[in-house]
């Protein structure tokens, strides 16, 4: 049996709800309460967001409805998705939000939880491997997992109408009132090892993938709406305001499975979007005679007669009052023209040929030529980072590539391109994410080394090693809990609410990332592993990338066996004889102590993985509960196979964030 978990480049968001006033317009909603006057109701927008995974290009889900739970009384349904519900690909939402509703008339009051209802019938969860999964991954490149191999844990209801309902408590109650601005972010954690578990017992003709939406979900506060980044919006223009300041689009989703040419499901969810009256919005008419030359619009007056009924892809940012302002708009009479431009994660960077491969929703790795005039942007700003191959081929001051595998990008192809592969007109870098093993941490930066595990047959130059500086201690930043902070900060994967900020953040980071776990033998030492997010042109790193924050990620330790059983006096067990990568390789020599945390609220996530009669059961065992701890102690006996995800400690042990132990198995493969 093999367990494959999501250890993400960034471990926070997978499904988010954004609630904010100030964006009027209709929505596809129903409510158990009657809307009142503006003094008794508020306005809500909803968005979903997520993070990438190396091995997948699609983790598609169907969200049916969203409800708010008041402190007293019945839940209020604020969004009901159209029928059939569109598929939302969580892998495209890497630290980005996608608005799924624009709700007005939400009853005033105090709400303490959010209820999400997801469709859970066969085929409602789509899993498609990436264009280049890691070597040994059990799903072929770009292949879709058959619905018969996907088991949705916790599904209820009759055949054809099965659902999973999740109730997420809000860490701080939400108060909705007339004219209020409220932001609530509710997140599934795709990094959670119990979210998706592969089970391939001996003799099985195919693996089964257990999808458990009940894995940890939490409320994530957002203090500043303007820092909430949005995915490009797809839609059809419904109207242009009479004063030409605003267009209203009907939200559109691509149809799954992907077809060619791709078509859209246009919903009744509307979004008003303003032109940037100060800096100008770049407008590309992809059907025009000069589609590669944008117009700069401070209003929509010059395109007011052109836009109605056209399909658009819009890069927009929030204003403090909740309005959306467009930085770039791409328009065409056909949905496929605006959608076919590659959006996804960079899979390969080849600076010899100046070709970049980007994953797409259909699982393919799409090749893109970087030309002399390709323009690079950062997020939804109008700032140009660089142009052409000089930027694409370039490196940071510390030697990291300017564009690296794992970056989330939106590419717009030049409609006039005659090259094979087609040349990119522009590349918007949504997230600049480096990750890897930390060495030589100092007071100004640290060295990151990343060697990817994949069968690279496209000539990519993906592995990297170089130094990344911290942002300046005076640079304004926002913590994961929504507080204003200055400078670089970091946190441990399992404790996003316990950020290390302030004057000691860098010193603490240096001390912590110096620790390693040494398995000996052919495995050797496992260093600390971090995931970073970077910004461009910080005062501490002019004209290059600098780390605004870092996550100390769990080191994925090898599958092994308990050699000394769990001790209730020390809350530890000894983990030894990790499996070799081949039958001839020497096994690791050093036993390693694993610490189980038992404090309520910060305890290790312990899961029993069991398969009987073809069904996989993943059972949480909370070690802060005395009864569960007793069961854990009994089950962690000598010889039991275990999988550990944790952080190295100074004494050479592993502080376990997550532990999986396996029962009723014939083999450990």
Image (spheres, rainbow, N blue to C red):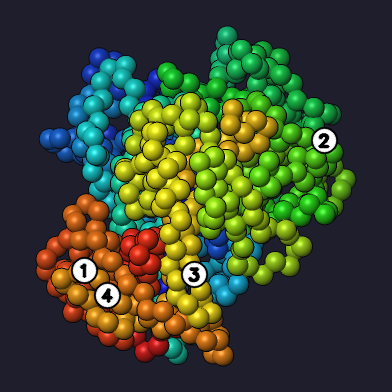
Instruction: Name the residue located 45 percent from the left edge and 54 percent from the top edge.
Output: 513
Residue carrying label 3: 525
In what element is the residue under mark 2?
loop
Q: Which mark is first along the chain, 2 or 3?
A: 2
| Residue 545 image position (x, y, % from top left) | 62, 38
Q: Nearer the viewer, mark 3 or mark 2?
A: 3
Q: Residue furthest right?
A: 418
Mark-to-mark CA distance, 4 and 1 = 7 Å
Q: Residues within 10 Å of mark 2 (few under 14, many from 20)?
A: some
Q: Residues within 10 Å of mark 3 (few under 14, many from 20)?
A: some
Q: Is residue 611 visible?
A: no
* Tag 2–tag 4 contact (CB < 8 Å): no
In what element is the residue under mark 4?
strand
Mark-to-mark CA distance, 3 and 2 = 45 Å
* Tag 3–tag 2 contact (CB < 8 Å): no
Q: Which mark is first along the chain, 4 or 2?
A: 2
Mark-to-mark CA distance, 4 and 3 = 19 Å
The foreground one among 593 and 64 is 593
* Tag 4–tag 1 contact (CB < 8 Å): no
Residue carrying label 2: 373
Residue carrying label 1: 571
Image quarter where the C terminus lies is: bottom left
| Residue 120 image position (x, y, % from top left) | 36, 60
* Residue 573 circle label: 4
Mark-to-mark CA distance, 3 and 1 = 24 Å
The foreground one among 439 and 96 is 439
Instruction: Name the residue located 28 percent from the left edge and 66 percent from the top edge.
Output: 595
Instruction: Name the residue located 23 percent from the left edge and 24 percent from the top edge.
Output: 108
In what element is the residue under mark 1?
loop
């Amino acid at each position: 049996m093999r367990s494959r978990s999501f250890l993400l480049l960034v471990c926070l968001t997978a499904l988010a709800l954004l609630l904010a006033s100030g964006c009027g317009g209709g929505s596809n909603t129903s409510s158990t309460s009657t809307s009142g006057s503006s003094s008794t109701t508020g306005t809500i927008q909803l968005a979903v967001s997520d993070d990438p995974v190396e091995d997948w290009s699609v983790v598609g889900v169907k969200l049916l409805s969203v409800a708010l739970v008041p402190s007293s009384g019945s839940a209020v349904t604020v969004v009901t998705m159209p029928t059939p519900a569109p598929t939302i690909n969580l892998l495209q939402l890497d630290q980005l939000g996608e608005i799924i509703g624009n709700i007005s008339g939400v009853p005033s009051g105090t709400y303490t939880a959010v209820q999400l209802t997801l469709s859970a019938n066969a085929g409602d969860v789509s899993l498609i491997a990436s264009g280049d999964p890691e070597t040994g991954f059990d799903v072929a490149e770009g292949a879709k997992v058959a619905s018969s191999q996907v088991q949705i844990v916790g599904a209820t209801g009759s055949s054809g109408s099965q659902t999973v309902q999740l109730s997420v408590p809000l860490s701080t109650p939400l108060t909705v009132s007339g004219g209020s601005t409220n932001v609530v972010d509710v997140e599934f954690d795709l990094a959670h090892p119990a979210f998706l578990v592969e089970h391939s017992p001996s003799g099985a003709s195919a693996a089964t993938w257990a999808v458990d939406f009940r894995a940890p979900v939490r409320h994530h506060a957002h203090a500043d709406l303007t820092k909430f980044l949005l995915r490009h919006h797809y839609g059809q223009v419904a109207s242009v305001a009479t004063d030409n300041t605003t267009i209203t689009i009907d939200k559109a989703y691509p149809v799954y499975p992907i077809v060619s040419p791709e078509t859209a499901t246009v919903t009744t969810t509307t979004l008003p979007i303003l032109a940037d009256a100060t800096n100008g919005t770049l407008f590309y008419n992809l059907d025009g005679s000069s589609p590669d030359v944008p117009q700069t619009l401070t209003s929509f007056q010059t395109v007011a007669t052109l836009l109605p009924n056209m399909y658009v892809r819009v890069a927009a940012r929030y204003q403090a009052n909740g309005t959306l302002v467009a930085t770039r708009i791409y328009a065409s009479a056909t949905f496929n023209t605006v959608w076919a431009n590659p959006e996804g994660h960079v899979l390969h960077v080849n600076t010899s040929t100046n070709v970049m491969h980007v994953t797409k929703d259909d699982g393919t790795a799409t090749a893109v030529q970087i030309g002399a005039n390709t323009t690079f942007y950062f997020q939804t700003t109008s700032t140009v980072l660089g142009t052409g191959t000089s930027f694409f081929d370039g490196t940071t001051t510390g030697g990291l590539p300017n564009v690296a595998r794992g970056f989330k990008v939106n590419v717009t192809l030049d409609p006039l391109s005659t090259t094979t592969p087609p040349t990119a007109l522009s590349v918007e870098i949504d997230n600049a994410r480096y990750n890897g093993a930390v060495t030589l941490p100092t007071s100004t930066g640290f060295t990151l080394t990343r060697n990817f595990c994949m069968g690279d047959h496209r000539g990519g130059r993906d592995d990297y090693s170089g130094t990344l500086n911290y942002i300046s201690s005076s640079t304004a930043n926002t913590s994961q809990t929504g507080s204003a902070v200055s400078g670089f900060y970091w946190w441990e994967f399992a404790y996003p609410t316990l950020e290390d900020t302030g004057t000691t953040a860098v010193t603490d980071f240096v001390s912590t990332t110096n620790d390693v776990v040494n398995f000996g033998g052919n495995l050797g030492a496992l260093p600390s592993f971090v995931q970073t997010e970077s910004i461009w042109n910080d005062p501490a790193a002019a004209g290059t990338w600098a780390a605004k924050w870092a996550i100390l990620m769990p080191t994925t330790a090898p599958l092994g066996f308990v050699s000394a059983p769990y001790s209730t006096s020390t809350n530890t067990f000894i983990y030894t004889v990790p499996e070799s990568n081949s039958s001839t390789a020497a096994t690791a020599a050093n036993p390693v102590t694993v610490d189980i945390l038992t404090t309520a609220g910060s305890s290790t996530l312990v899961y029993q993985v069991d398969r009987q009669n073809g069904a996989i059961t993943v059972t949480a065992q909370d070690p802060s509960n005395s009864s569960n701890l007793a069961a854990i102690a009994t089950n962690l006996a000598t010889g039991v196979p275990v999988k550990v995800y944790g952080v190295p400690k100074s004494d050479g042990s592993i502080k376990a964030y997550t532990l999986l132990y396996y029962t009723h198995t014939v083999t450990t493969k």
